[in-house]
Amino acid sequence: MNFEFSDEQNMLREQAQTFLNAECPPQAVRAVLDGDAPYDEGLWQKVVEMGWTATVIPEAYDGLGLSYLELSVIAEELGRSMAPIPFSSSVYFATEALLLAGSETQKHEWLPKLARGEVIGCLADAESGGQLTAAGLTSRYADGRLTGRKIPVADGDVAGLAVVVAGSDQGPVMVLVDLNQSGCQRQAIKTLDPSRSHAEVIFEGAEATLLGEAGDGWNLLQQLYNRAAVLFAWEQVGGAETALSMAKDYALNRFAFGRPIATYQAIKHKLAQAYVKNTLARGNCYYGAWALDTSADELPLAAASARVSAIQAYYYASKENIQTHGGMGFTWEFDCQFPYRRSKLLAVNIGSEAIWQEKLIAAIEAERAA
């Protein structure tokens, strides 16, 4: 079976790389990291104009109706540039939740707005530190109203639509909430990666509409995580390759004792190991993209494989990039911090590596028992 991308998809990659090289250089990431803006609004509007936010949305809802393979290509390139925009929150979470469980009324109301970038979406799931569990949900949904506190919510300070997981008398539910109402209070919070904004969101009797069936919220969340895990893994692979490229370029041009440090065995081993981890992660990402695009039964296994290997690859490459740069790598002026910060953020945004290792083991056991 050939998991490679087609010629057309590779043309999309070249187009995306050209666009992002011009519109999202490291200076653009640093501007958001150092500044007060929650994201690069100019870049976001250009991404919307490129049609990327509409990639997998069916044409019936003003989307492009393309496949998840095209979206995977875009995700990798956004990860490679570490774009400081709310793409993942709006596309991997809000859009996917509606495609997964939305009614026709909900899809017609929200998907065209998400496709055109008129509304930014987000997922509000976490409520405190530690692993999120169905029994531990403290936010409550009853009689069309939502109460509770969600923190951290990626892009919660700039989103107009939230997909929220909450408890109810029927069990966990997933609901849609228009954040531009008086029952929603938002406050930006600081994280390790300031180039991606996060917020605390408090719901005080906010109007909410049920997404899917009552009591099925936890199952829907796990399905949403599996879809997002594949797309985030592609972002992580793109970022890991950027980190490796930064380390390689510096090692080739940094001289010590009259020779490039790239000729020293200790540096060679670091870069070689990063290459191996990146290649392994990419292979798992191909598997995940295929499973996602075909709605294969293997998606839980493929998603967990991609997620675990991509977390490991991105962290290792970003860490060794700093080490390769030596004392300079730890300074604010160097860009080594960008992939390191993003790697740490993406490693926990839908559950830690340990959680996904457990999911991987469960998926393998389920496949063997079938």
Image (tube, rainbow, N blue to C red):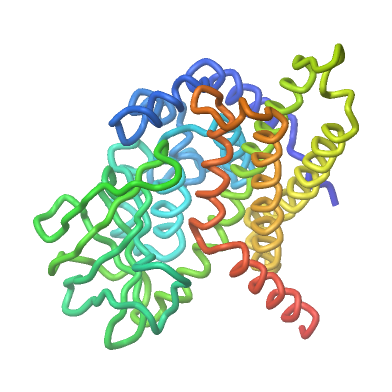
Q: Residue at x 29, y 59 (%)?
A: 105
| Rendered residue at 65%/74% (across/down) | 358
Q: Position of residue 290 (x, y in %)?
A: 70, 53
Which residue sits at x=40%, y=75%? 217
Depth check: 146 or 340 in front? Answer: 340
Which quadrant would residue 325 be assigned to in this image? top right
In percent of width and height, residue 125 lies at 38, 65
Q: Nearer the viewer, residue 163 or 240?
A: 240
Q: Residue furthest front?
A: 257
Q: Quadrant of residue 367?
A: bottom right
Q: Is residue 326 left or right of residue 47?
A: right
- Give the position of the C terminus as an image quadrant: bottom right
Residue 60 position (above or below residue 321)? below
Question: Could you tell me which residue is drawn at 41 percent across and 51 percent down?
Answer: 95
Total marks placed: 0
In the rendered structure, the answer to whether residue 257 lies left or right of residue 6 reads right
Q: Is residue 2 above or below residue 101?
A: above
Classify residue 36 as left or right of residue 273. left
Q: Position of residue 2 (x, y in %)?
A: 83, 47
Q: Extreme bottom residue here?
A: 169
Farthest-out residue, top: 258
Q: Nearer the viewer, residue 26 or 252?
A: 252
Using the image, determine if residue 9 lies above or below residue 151.
Answer: above
Image position, residue 336 (x, y; %): 59, 31
